[in-house]
Image (cartoon, rainbow, N blue to C red):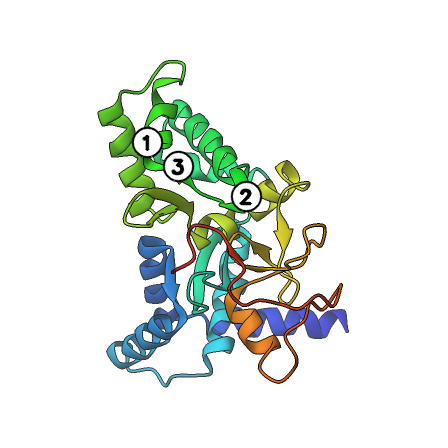
């Protein structure tokens, strides 16, 4: 059995070719792609390299087998905003928050960690920080960051897909990349605050919630669409009538 496992690894390594390398080069640049765009990219790469396309899941498995040794992996998730499947290139090192430091100074990383705390601990499960609050945080840093420098930094976080803006740029919210890449850090630091979606069991920062105040059931909107498609709308835990309009998280589209 052990020999068979080694033979499988050798086979997968042999299958790693120019199509996988080109795909990884793109992922290193973009870090996150909608799955449909990732598949289109893969098909285009196969045309350029004159290679026959294989099953995309198998293709991703081969890539992951090759990059695991350098603490990287491709992970799938669904965007909380619209339910679309995304593929994110994730750093799997133990100290995940340190991975943000690649392109940022120590003071900027400290700012980012404090900004995450403001987002996670925001009132009424908003999971967002106002643009003004984010700017003010910069001036409280030691050493302080000017408002202009703070805005430039926030723009970089958005460009690098750690954050995105919501409600006409009035708020900053965690991007799916942050939730996937910093999952261990978030769970360790905020285990008493963050909840998992009742259906997919992934961290949830926006969606629908049970109307019973003491009930902790939360669902992504796309998970709720599936769950309630053929059953009565009631909480799967406490059986309270479920209102599809009882939502939380300022990143959720209105």
From the image, tell me which residue sits under label 3. 102
User: Do the residues bearing badges 3 and 2 touch, measured as CB atoms within 8 Å?
Assistant: no
Residue 78, position as x, y percentages in the image: 49, 65
Judge left or right: residue 38 versus residue 126: left
Residue 72, position as x, y percentages in the image: 50, 53
**Label at residue 124:** 2
Choose the circle earlier in sequence order: 1 or 3. 3
Q: Nearer the viewer, mark 1 or mark 2?
A: 2
Residue 230, position as x, y percentages in the image: 62, 85
Choose the circle earlier in sequence order: 3 or 2. 3
Give me the C-alpha separation between circle 1 and circle 3. 26 Å
Q: What residue is rendered at 36% in x and 59% in y?
A: 27
Q: What residue is rendered at 59% in x and 40% in y?
A: 185
Give me the C-alpha separation between circle 3 and circle 2. 33 Å
Along the line of sight, the residue nearer the viewer: 223 or 107: 223
* 43 lies above or below 89: below
From the image, tell me which residue sits under label 1. 132
* 90 lies above or below 229: above
Judge left or right: residue 87 versus residue 3: left
């Amino acid at each position: 059995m052990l020999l068979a496992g080694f033979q499988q690894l050798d086979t997968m390594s042999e299958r790693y070719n120019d199509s996988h390398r080109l795909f990884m080069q793109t992922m290193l640049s973009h870090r996150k792609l909608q799955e449909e765009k990732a598949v289109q990219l893969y098909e285009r790469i196969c045309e350029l390299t004159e290679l026959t396309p294989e099953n995309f899941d198998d293709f991703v498995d081969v890539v992951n087998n090759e990059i695991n040794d350098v603490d990287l992996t491709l992970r799938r998730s669904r965007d909380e905003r619209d339910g679309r499947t995304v593929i994110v290139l994730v750093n799997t090192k133990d100290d995940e928050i340190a991975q943000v430091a690649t392109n940022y100074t120590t003071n900027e990383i400290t700012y980012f960690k404090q900004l995450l705390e403001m987002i996670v601990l925001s009132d009424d499960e908003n999971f967002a920080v106002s643009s003004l609050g984010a700017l003010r945080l910069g001036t409280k840093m030691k050493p302080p960051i000017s408002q202009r420098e703070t805005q430039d930094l926030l723009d970089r976080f958005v460009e690098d897909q750690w954050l995105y803006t919501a409600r006409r740029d009035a708020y900053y919210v965690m991007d799916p990349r942050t939730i996937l890449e910093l999952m261990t850090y978030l769970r360790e630091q905020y285990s008493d605050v963050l909840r998992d979606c009742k259906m997919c069991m992934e961290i949830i920062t926006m969606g629908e919630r049970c109307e019973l105040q003491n009930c902790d059931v939360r669902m992504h909107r796309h998970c709720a669409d599936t769950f309630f498609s053929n059953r009565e709308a009631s909480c799967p835990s406490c059986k309270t009538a479920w209102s599809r309009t009882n939502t939380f998280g300022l990143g959720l589209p209105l």
